[in-house]
Amino acid sequence: MALTASTMIPLGEKAADFNLLDPASGSMISLSAVKKSRGVLVIFMCNHCPYVKHILPALREFAQDYRNSDIGIVGISSNDVDNYPDDAPELMAKLALGFPYLYDESQAIAKAYDAVCTPEFYLYDGDLKLVYRGQFDDSRPGNDMPVTGSDLRAAMDALLAGTAIPTEQKPGMGCNIKWKAP
């Protein structure tokens, strides 16, 4: 695993549109289908990454806590499944998360978002402008810090309350996205 930090794209950037396969339902799901009135959280993740596995129970709890909020949540896996079969769509479908978990087979959506690691979080407001990008919290595998989602929760709560989201944000850290060979 190659530890990679998120690119921290500029705040205010517009969310890239998508229409991707939801392996659990077999249907295609678009950005507009997951966005709610206050915004949408886009999470780049995968099945096999130890950083994703580390936060997974707390991420499920997070999704449950915000399930009835006015912010939609969607996960996207963009990894090369030929070389990383644990991330295959049929295995994605078995990972119950509490939100749609979509497959970016072409990797075009990861590139459009400048996503480089898993997990990586992008929070957009109701106008689909980026207001938060970065980490779930300070916990990492092996650092003995509790997994709380505190950084992302603070941003979600501020967006829901209509208050300012701090612009000083820490990059997400995790495994690099597994790109297909050119």
Image (cartoon, rainbow, N blue to C red):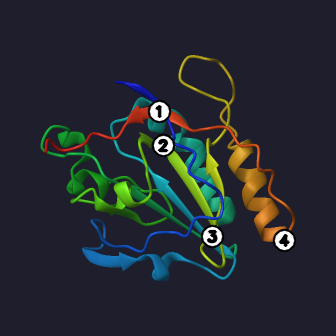
Mark whose residue sits in front, 3 or 2:
3
From the image, tell me which residue sits under label 4: 162
Residue 124's spot in the image, x, y percent? Answer: 62, 67
From the image, tell me which residue sits under label 2: 119
Mark 4 and mark 2 in contact? Answer it, CB < 8 Å: no
Instruction: Tell me if mark 1 has few (under 14), some (14-19) or many (20+) residues whose alpha carbon lies within 10 angstroms of its own.
Output: many
Earlier along the polypeptide chain: callout 1 or callout 3? 3
Residue 165's spot in the image, x, y percent? Answer: 80, 57
3D distance between C-alphas at marks 1 and 3:
24 Å
Mark 3 and mark 4 in contact? Answer it, CB < 8 Å: no
Earlier along the polypeptide chain: callout 3 or callout 2? 2
Dot 2 lies on which element?
A: loop
Query: Relative to residue 176, is residue 73 drawn left or right?
Result: right
From the image, tell me which residue sits under label 1: 174
Residue 60's spot in the image, x, y percent? Answer: 55, 52
- Mark 2 is on which residue type? Pro
Earlier along the polypeptide chain: callout 4 or callout 2? 2
Residue 63's spot in the image, x, y percent? Answer: 60, 59
Dot 3 lies on which element?
A: loop
- Mark 1 is on which residue type? Gly
Q: Number of numbered discs present?
A: 4
- Mark 4 is on which residue type? Gly
Mark whose residue sits in front, 3 or 4:
3
Dot 1 lies on which element?
A: strand
- When the figure is inspected, residue 101 is found, relative to residue 57, above or below; the finding is below
